[in-house]
Structure formats: C-alpha cells, structure tokens
Image: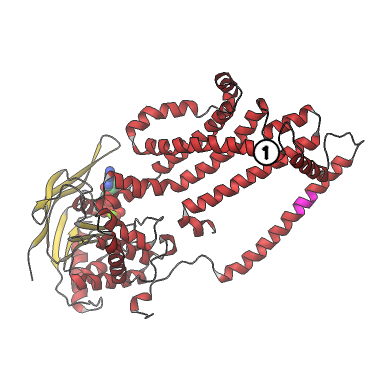
Amino acid sequence: MNKHVKISAENVSKEFIQKGTQRVPVLKDISLQVFDQELLVVLGPGQSGKTTLLRIIAGLEKPTQGRITLDGEEIRGPGPDRGLVFQSYMLFPWKTVEANVRLGLEMAQVPKEKHAETVRHYLDLVGLNGFEKYYPHQLSGGMKQRVGIARAFSTQPKVMLMDEPFGQLDAQTRLFMERETERIWLSDKRTTIFITNNIDEALLLGDRIVTLEGKLPGRMKKSYEVNLPRPRDPMDMEFLKLRHTITSEQELTL
Amino acid sequence: MSKSTHDVSNEVVVRTIVRKRLTLRSLVREEKFLYVVSLVVFFTIWHLAATRGNGDSALVTPWATLQGLYDMMSSPLGGETLVGHTWNSLRRVLIGFSIAVCFGIPLGLLLGISETASAILRPLVDVFRPMPPLAWISLSILWFGIGEEPKIFIIFLASFIPSVLNAYNGVRLIEPELYDVVRVMGGSRWDEIKQVVVPASMPAISAGLQLSITSAWMGVLAAELVSSNSGLGYIIILGMQNSDPQMVLGGMVMIAAVAWVLTASMEKIDMMLCPWRREIKGL
Ligand SMILES: Nc1ncnc2c1ncn2[C@@H]1O[C@H](COP(=O)(O)OP(=O)(O)OP(=O)(O)O)[C@@H](O)[C@H]1O
Ligand SMILES: [Mg+2]
C-alpha cells in the first residue's frame, strides 16, 4: 500500500473563548497522520471535540497551537480541495437536489456546459438519479445525507471529511448508508476522514481507527489497524475481538 | 428504469397522502358549509337592522349598498367614478410601497450582514420604529403641501419599517453553518451573500412584504381621510359630509375588496419568491 502522507496534524490544540472570558480547551496535542487513499475513522464519544477537529482540517477554525498540512502545505483556510459532509446535512432548503449538488461547481467557476454532466455523475454515484427536482424537505434523512455526500464530492476534493454523517439515521438506514459509503469509497479510494461515536460503524468502515479521549479537551488515545477483509461482517470473530479490545480500552478513560 | 439495490432506501416524503385526503376533504366541506351559514346570518342581521325603524336610519340594507356601489361606478363623484377613485388610492399605494421596498429590503439585509452598518443605523431605526406612520400626517402636509407627495410619504413610512425589520431578522436567523457550506467550497463573501443571505432570508422578506402592503393600504386611507379630493378615503369623507350612508358603506366595501386583492396578490408573490415552501405550507 502506498504510504504517502496526505494530511498531517502536528500538536494541534484548540481553545474556545466562551461568554467573553472563559477559556474552554476543546482539543489538546492532537498529532495525526492520514495516508493517501486511506479511510481513517476518528472514534470519540459525544462532546469530545470531534467536530472541532474536522472543522480545523476544513480550515473553518484556526488551531490555537500546532499546524495541519495537506500534501505538505499548511492549511490556512477553507478550500475546495477538502469536501465536508456535515453532521446535520446543511442542505439549502431553497434549492433542489440537483441545484444543491451544483453549488460547488458554480463557485469553482466550472464552465456551465459541464455542470449537468458532473451533477448527474455524482447523483448516480450516491444512488439518487430520478430525484433531481426534489426539494430537501421531501427527502428522508438518508437521502438528504446522500445529497450532502454528492455535494461534497462535486468539487472533486483531495480529501473527504465526514462528520458523523449518519448520526441522525435509524439503525437500519444507518447500516445501509455505511455499506454505501464503503462502496463509494472503494470505487475511487478518495482519502477520507470519517468521524463517528459508533464503534460498529468505525469497524465496518475504517482502515484504521483512532480514538479520542472522553472528556474535554479531547486527546488522541490510541490507533488501531483494522486488517479485516471488506465487506466486513459484524458477527465475524475477529471483528468482535477488535470491538472488545477497543471498547474496553475506551472505557478505561471514562 | 432499472431498480438497483440502492433504490430501496430512497423513500420520498410526498405530502399529498391519499388516505388523509378523504378526511381532510370532508372537513373542508364542513368548514365551507359553516362559512356560508355564517355569512348568511350576518347579512340577514344587517338587513333586519337596516329595515327596522323609520327609514331614516344611518344604515342601509346590503342590497342598497350594492346599488350604491353600482351608481358610484357609473356616475362620477368629485370628477371621477368609483373606479377612478380606487385607482387613485391604489396608485399611491403602489408608488409608496415600491419605493419603501426598494430601499427597505437592501437596508435590512445590510443591517443584518454588517456589524458596522448595524451599529450606525440601528439606533435610527429604533427611534423611528415605534412612531405610528399616521403620526406623521400633519408634518408631511406641512412639508409637502396637499398634493400627492404627502400621501406617498405616509405610505412610504408605513411600509418601510416592516420591510427593513423583516429583512434584518431574516438574516439574523440564518443558521451560521450554512455559510460554512459556501466557505468550504471556496466561495467568497459575495457568494455567501448571493447563495445564502438572500435566499435564506426570503421567507422573512416575503412576510415583510405582506405586512408592508397591509399597512400601506391603511396609510393611504388615513392620509386621504385627512386631506384629499380623490381616492377611497375621500369618498368616505364625502359620504359622511353628505350624510349618505350608501356612499360610506359602498366605499368601505371597496376598501375591503382592494385589501383582499392586495393580500391575495402578496400570497401569489410569496409562492413565486419561495417556491420550495409550496408543499410545506400545505401541511
Ligand atoms: N465556535 C465555538 N465557540 C465556542 N465553543 C465551541 C465552539 N465550537 C465548539 N465549542 C465547544 O466545544 C465543545 C466540543 O464541540 P464539538 O462539536 O467539537 O464536539 P463533538 O465531539 O463534535 O460533539 P458531538 O458529539 O455533540 O458532535 C462544545 O461543547 C462547545 O462547548
Ligand atoms: Mg460533532
């Protein structure tokens, strides 16, 4: 496997100032490497700074200390080379499915003739052809997040950042979307950072899992290689063993 | 069309559910029936009230009101028919309202977007906001005389504040993460305004338009009641001076009718401005 480092975080810490004066440390000394074509899962409990970490990588927040590089260059702000899938979808309710996906193309000043084709390509990829003219409020949660994924893909980012994308879905749809994510990821091996608080989701998807400690500020705890063949079976012995290891080590910190 | 596996989880929320329609429809029928009953009772009471007494009552029957309306449409009053007077009022409203909206909405958006603009202009808005537009009538006549200008000025004032405030609140209620969507894609500040600020505040802006047009219509009548020689407000005053209840009631009916048309048009405009809400509203 190609071990080219795509994203590298070096001692990243983040403090927020709340209520004017109160300093809240949210991330502490995060060092992390994401390799090219890797699907890295960041596993952490609720309120452990997961979203903040992803937003720093996206360039939407600045780290208080440390730095993050993408292909060796320091990240200084947001840009279309990183696609972000939001925890709460963040579709534009005034735009149709098609127009939501087209948004990135309009801003990247892709020539108009190419829009239709690109939009169709990514809607196909997420299995939404036939729903181009629907508005977000007409879609189920799983479909909304597919639009979110297609939209993030449309600018052809170097890395995909997915923030608990299926946290709001029911168990069945969630499992289905996880399979879909695996299928899409296998189809072009786009480097992906996938955030979750769900251990099964982490084990189904990750090439590697890094865990965040439970209390603020979030710290990196451990890293696990998941060397199981895909598609993975949650009832498989190896799967369950690793699940047990991670759960018990995770619980120690709580 | 081929059914691939992933079509399975594509459930679409379609709002017109057949099962619901049946109960809904019968409900609507029932409501319509009650609606008609209510109106019939109202007009009967009106009629009885008007025919009681010695015929010198200040109230005329619904039928006489309709006749009065017809007469005023065919024979001119103060140089114009009722249609002409209606148009005079309406024209003033449309001019004042358009000016107010053209300045008010951009100003409201600006206040919402820019902290500096808000810091400078909000105090002014706050000073003028509680002042009822009608309080300006005397001043505006002093400033502008008795022509069209004072009336248009009153209408402008009446519709300006709701336009500003609704646009402003529309911007302030925008979910901040929506901006992040644009920023992550490499969009500029201008993209944020074009792609998020304007469309996301459109429902609030549209609600502001409805408020503005209603208050503009009240404004024009008040201005015409005070000083005018044309318009629906003038008709009512003329009827009062001539002790002609037919004329007053006819004018009132026309005022209500125009108000209804204005409100209905604004709802149409709302549908055009916010097409994505069509189904949501039907819920
Ligand atoms: N912009 C901000 N300003 C101030 N404080 C913030 C900001 N963003 C996050 N925080 C603080 O950081 C904490 C952790 O936030 P974050 O959303 O990163 O955690 P999370 O692990 O993604 O949580 P969740 O499981 O709920 O998604 C929050 O509780 C909040 O107090
Ligand atoms: Mg989060």
B39 part of magenta stretch: yes
Residue B265 image point, x, y percent: 57, 48
Image quarter where the N terminus of chain A lies is bottom left
Residue extending furthest toward the bottom:
B2
Q: Main secondary structure of the magenta part?
A: helix
**Highlighted magenta segment, given as a residue range:** B37-41
Residue A159 image point, x, y percent: 18, 60
Amino acid type, callout 1: Gly
Left/right placement of residue B123 relative to residue B157 reads left
Residue placed most toward the observer, B139 or B110: B139
Neighbours of disc 1 within 10 Å: few (<14), some (14-19), many (20+): some
Residue A197 found in image quarter: bottom left
Image height check: is B10 above or below B35? below
* Chain assignment, label 1: B
Image quarter where the C terminus of chain A lies is bottom left
Image height check: is B56 above or below B26? above
B104 part of magenta stretch: no
Residue A86 found in image quarter: bottom left
Residue B164 image point, x, y percent: 46, 36
Residue extending furthest toward the top:
B142
Left/right placement of residue A121 relative to residue B17 reads left
Residue placed most toward the observer, B70 or A146: B70
Number of marks drawn: 1
Q: Residue at x 15, y 57 (%)?
A: A221
Residue placed most toward the observer, B198 or A52: B198
- In this figure, which residue is indicated by the disc labeled 1? B84
Residue placed most toward the observer, A204 or A99: A99
Left/right placement of residue B276 relative to residue A251 reads right
